[in-house]
Amino acid sequence: MTNQPTNQLTDEPARPLHTGRVLPPGGGTRAESEAEIAKRLDLFTVETPRRQFKDLILPDHTRQQFNSLLTKIRYHRVLYEDFGLSEIDPYGGRTAINLYGPPGTGKSFAADATANELGMGIIRANYAEIESKYVGETAKNIKAAFQKAKETGALLFFDEADSILGRRLSNVRQSTDHAVNVSRSVMLLELDQFSGVTVFATNLASNYDTAFIRRILGHIEMPLPDADQRLRLWQYHLPARLPVQLAEADWARLVMETEGLAGGDILNIVVNAASMALDREGIGCQITVKDFSRAIGISKRAKEEVGQPLQALENSTI
C-alpha cells in the first residue's frame, strides 16, 4: 500500500517561553544524535498479540464493522487498483480505526485481536510514554512511535487517544499551549504519511479535533453489553478450573445484577469473588452466587462513588 501526505500544516510562530515546561537539555534546537533517536525508538516495543476475535463478545453490527475494515486492509489492492478506488481516493493507503465507548467494553482487547487477525505485532503507544515534561519532546515521541511501526510493520495502538487527538487550542498564551498545537499538527502529518494500521481507543470521543475525525477510516462504537452478551461474558470469564458452585437459576441472577456493567467489570468481579471465597475457606473453597453478588455490589458502589465530587457524596448520605 502506498500513501502520501494530503496536506501540509504550518505551525504557529514560536512564542517566547515564560511559563510551563522547561526546555530539554541543549534548548531543544539541536538535531538528535543516532543514539538519542535509538533511545527514543526504544520507548516503543513490539508485542505479540494474544487476543482473538472469536473471544471478543460484540453486537452483530459491531462485528460486521470490524469485518468490513479488515477486508479493506486485506484486499486493498483489489479495492484501489482493480475496482478503481484510487481514482477518487489517491491517499487511501492509511487505515486508522477509532474505538469508542465506556470503560471496560473491550477496546484494548479489540485492538490486540485486530493485530492478531492481520498477523501483525502491536505497539501500545500509551499517552504516559508519549507525553514529556520538555517542550517539543512530545512531538518527537509521536514521530518515533510511527517510525517504529513503519520499521517493524506493527499495528500502532494509541490508548486514551483523546489526550493526543484533542482539539487544538485557538488562544495560545504560553509555551505549553503552543507545544500542544505542535503535537496535534505532528500527529496529523504522521497519520497522513503512515500507510500502516493505526487503532485509537477512547472513552471521550467527543473531545476529538474534527481534523482527526476526517482522517479516521472507521469509527466503531464499543457499547455496554446486553443481557445475552453479559451471559456470554460470564461464561467466558469462568475458567473450567475455577471452583464455582452455581445452579441453573444463578446464571440469570448474575446477568440481571450486572446490567449496566461492562466486560472489564465482570472480569474484576470474578477475581474479587474468587479472592473472597479463598480468604473465607482456603484453597478448598467453593465460589458461590453470594460471592459474586457481593462483588457485584462492591463494583457498582465504586462506580457510583469513586471520582464523584465530595459534595455529591455528602448529599448521597443525607
Image (tube, grey):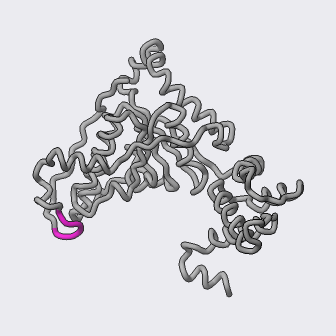
Rendered view: 56 above or below 174: above
Rendered view: 288 above or below 111: below
Image coordinates of residue 245 in percent, x first then y, are: 83, 60
Residue 226 appears in the rendering: no
At 45% from the left and 22% from the top, the residue drawn is 76
Q: Quadrant of the C terminus?
A: bottom right
Magenta segment: does it hold 22? yes
Query: Magenta span covers which residues?
Result: 18-23
At 68% from the left and 63% from the top, the residue drawn is 269
Rendered view: 310 above or below 167: below
Residue lying at the far bottom of the rendered structure: 318
Rendered view: 171 above or below 191: below
At 46% from the left and 12% from the top, the residue drawn is 82
Magenta segment: does it hold 92? no
Residue 23 appears in the rendering: yes
Task: Identify the main secondary structure in magenta.
Answer: loop
